[in-house]
Amino acid sequence: HLEVPAMGSAISRVQRLDHPRPAGQHVIGCMRGRLPAPSSGGGGCALLAQIHYPADDGSPPVSDEKFHWFRQEAIDSLARNYGLPRIAFQALIGSKPQLDPSSAVLRREGPGWPVIVFSHGLWGTCEMYTQFCRELASLGTIVVALEHEDGSAV
């Protein structure tokens, strides 16, 4: 049984932890949004994706839109599905800002950057593997982390 002051102190320490700098040589940019829906008349819907990529460190942000590391919808779902208090998830990850700015993609001579489509799997979210996707992007790939909105995600 943790007392409230001890829990508050533990949460405070966790909130101050920074994500490690990825090992690759590239600065990273990140955007989150909906990919365009197919226009083939199939009635498909736009997919939510978080995209990590090698960024041009000297460029201004391509978007002024800021987002939190975890979406409120994901925090609510994590708490509900894991049977834990929502306030705990909110305190730990709810107020963390995005880790990387929405800078322009770094231009590359020759062929473009390799693209990796990342699937978080069952009971996950596109945010849960952010650090792994950041590592891949820092090595020179564009990583498209898709959100499964078919009920298989958290």
Image (cartoon, helix red, strand yellow):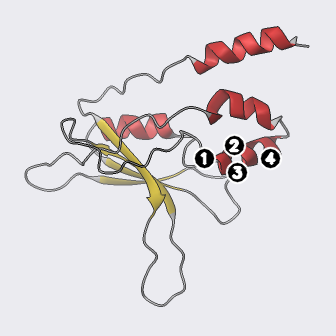
Badge 4: how crowded within 10 Å, few (<14), some, or many (20+)?
few
Q: Quickly name the residue at label 4.
A: 81
Q: Residue at x 43, y 41 (%)?
A: 133
Which of discs 1 and 4 lies nearer the camera? The answer is 1
The kind of residue tagged 4 is Asn
Q: Quickly name the residue at label 2.
A: 75
On screen, residue 84 versus residue 31, left or right, reads right
Badge 2: how crowded within 10 Å, few (<14), some, or many (20+)?
some
Q: Residue at x 46, y 76 (%)?
A: 37
Image marks 3 and 1: residues in contact by CB distance under 8 Å: no
Q: Position of residue 80 (x, y in %)?
A: 81, 46
Image marks 1 and 2: residues in contact by CB distance under 8 Å: yes
Residue furthest toward the left? 109
**Mark 1 to mark 2 CA distance (whole Å):** 6 Å
Q: Earlier in the sequence, mark 3 or mark 1?
A: 1
Picture layout, residue 41 above or below residue 23: below
The kind of residue tagged 3 is Val
Q: Position of residue 57 (x, y in %)?
A: 22, 35
Q: Residue at x 53, y 39 (%)?
A: 69
On screen, residue 146 versus residue 154, left or right, reads left
Q: Secondary structure at mark 2?
A: helix
Picture layout, residue 150 above or below residue 154: below
**Mark 3 to mark 2 CA distance (whole Å):** 9 Å
Q: Residue at x 38, y 45 (%)?
A: 30
